[in-house]
Amino acid sequence: MEYNIQDIIEYIVKDLRIEYDEAMLLFYNSQTFDKLTDTETGLYLESSAYIYGIFQDERNFGNLFQAEI
């Protein structure tokens, strides 16, 4: 899970062109992060690219829309 988080934060830094610390705060305060750290969801088993897609959807739509979460 730790590697996924690092990858996702790097995606955020690159895509949003923000500092690493700001990207960390953005991700750690997201619903996606909450679901990722909840072992009941199984989201931690997915790839970092897949999880980042969920994070992008959350940012774009203001909510999580993944049926499996």
Image: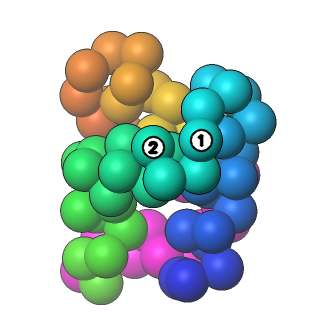
Residue 69 pos. (x, y %)? 29, 55
Which residue is labeled 2 in the image?
A: 22
Q: Is residue 52 visible?
A: no
Q: How is the image coloured?
A: rainbow
Is disc 2 placed on a helix, strand or loop?
Answer: helix
25 vs 47: above or below:
above
Horizontal placement of 53 versus 42: left or right? right
35 vs 66: above or below:
below
- Disc 2 marks a residue whose amino acid type is Glu
Residue nearer the viewer, 23 or 2: 23
Residue 50 located within the stretch drawn in magenta: yes
Magenta stretch bounds: 40-51
The residue at the point 28 percent across, 46 percent down is 30
Mark 2 closeness class: few <14, some 14–19, many ≥20 residues within 10 Å: few
Residue nearer the viewer, 39 or 34: 34
Is disc 1 placed on a helix, strand or loop?
Answer: loop
Q: Quadrant of residue 40?
A: bottom left
Residue 25 pos. (x, y %)? 35, 50
Residue 64 pos. (x, y %)? 29, 35
Disc 1 + disc 2, Cβ < 8 Å: yes
Which residue is labeled 1 in the image?
A: 19
Q: Is residue 58 visible?
A: yes
The residue at the point 45 percent across, 43 percent down is 22
